[in-house]
Amino acid sequence: MELTGTVIALLPEVSGQGKNGTWRKQEFILEIPSQYPKKVCISLWGDKIDQAGLQVNDAVTASIDVESREYNNRWYTEVKAWKVDKAGAANGGGNSYNSGSSNSTLPPVTTFTEDESDDLPF
């Protein structure tokens, strides 16, 4: 699944020690443009943090997986990015889904004037 939008916040990187060694995680907030913009918190793990090189206001397309886990009879959902492409990047031109600025424009609005005939019965 892919989400396209603008990075509006970068949360602090966290790290820890697990059974497989040291781990790193950084979350960022992606705002997805629409009539009612949506915000999604997405996690980057390990070397993907350095590869993405995200900055606030970057336009990106994130390839994600959504996973939920149960712990103590509660469910927790995480959105993990396995690839992040910046808009306008040199290697991003060949993508079948372009995340350029054309996504942020709305379709033209059709307006009617009072002198046009109205065939509606009410």
Image: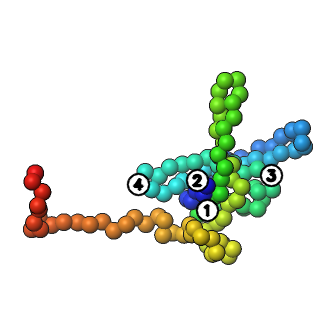
| Amino acid type for the residue under numbered disc 1 | Val
Q: Is residue 75 above or below residue 96?
A: above
* Residue position marked by numbered label 1 in the rendering: 60
Front in this rendered view, residue 1 or 39? 1
Residue 66 visible in the snapshot: yes
The residues tagged by marks 4 and 3 sit, at their Cα atoms, a distance apart of 34 Å
Q: Which comes before the other along the chain, label 2 or label 1?
A: 2
The residues tagged by marks 2 and 3 sit, at their Cα atoms, a distance apart of 19 Å
Is disc 2 placed on a helix, strand or loop? strand
Asked where in the image residue 23 lies, by quadrant, the reply is top right
Q: Which mark is residue 35?
A: 4
- Residue 119 drawn at (x, y percent): 11, 61
Q: Which mark is residue 46?
A: 3
| Amino acid type for the residue under numbered disc 4 | Gln
| Amino acid type for the residue under numbered disc 3 | Gly
Mark 3 packing: few (<14 Cα in 10 Å), some, or many (20+)? Answer: few
